[in-house]
Image (cartoon, helix red, strand yellow):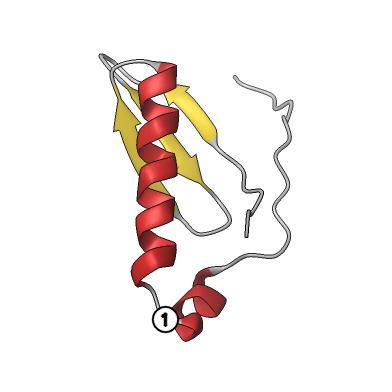
Amino acid sequence: MNKHLTAIIAKEINMYSALCPELDIASQGADVAEARNNLREALELFFETASEEEIKKRMHDEVYVTRLEIAVA
């Protein structure tokens, strides 16, 4: 079975961080591809080892990624 999840990848000082907001699972890598692959591996390991109860408890069914405009003084 395949799941479609969100990956948010951001440049940090000297690496990239990757976050899956549906499960609050994160990873990192030296570049975007490595961060994405490491996040995929972390998610696959989570699904292999977590109980159904843990998956259900952590899973956010609705996640919205958007941009905001704010006033900065």
Figure check: 53 above or below 14? below
How many numbered discs?
1
Q: Which residue is mark 1?
A: 51
Q: Is residue 24 left or right of residue 13?
A: right
Q: Quadrant of the C terminus?
A: top right
Front in this rendered view, residue 69 or 3: 3
Quadrant assignment, res 54: bottom left
Q: Residue drawn at (43%, 18%), measured in percent from left and top? A: 32
For the point 34% across and 40% down, the residue is: 27
Q: Position of residue 65 (x, y in %)?
A: 70, 39
Residue at position x 69%, y 24% from top? 71
Left or right of residue 73, residue 29 in this image: left
Query: Percent position (x, y) of residue 62?
Result: 73, 59
Choose between 41 and 17: the one closer to the eye: 41
Looking at the rendered structure, the secondary structure element under dot 1 is loop
Residue 1's place in the image compared with 7, above or below, is below
Residue at (63% x, 65% y) in the render: 60
Which residue is situated farthest in the bottom direction here? 53
Q: Position of residue 15 (x, y in %)?
A: 29, 19
Q: Neighbour class for label 1 at 10 Å: few (<14), some, many (≥20)? A: few
Rendered view: 51 above or below 49? below
Q: Is residue 62 left or right of residue 8?
A: right
Q: Is residue 22 above or below residue 5?
A: below
Q: Amino acid at mark 1?
A: Ser
Q: Quadrant of the N terminus?
A: bottom right
Q: Position of residue 18 (x, y in %)?
A: 43, 35
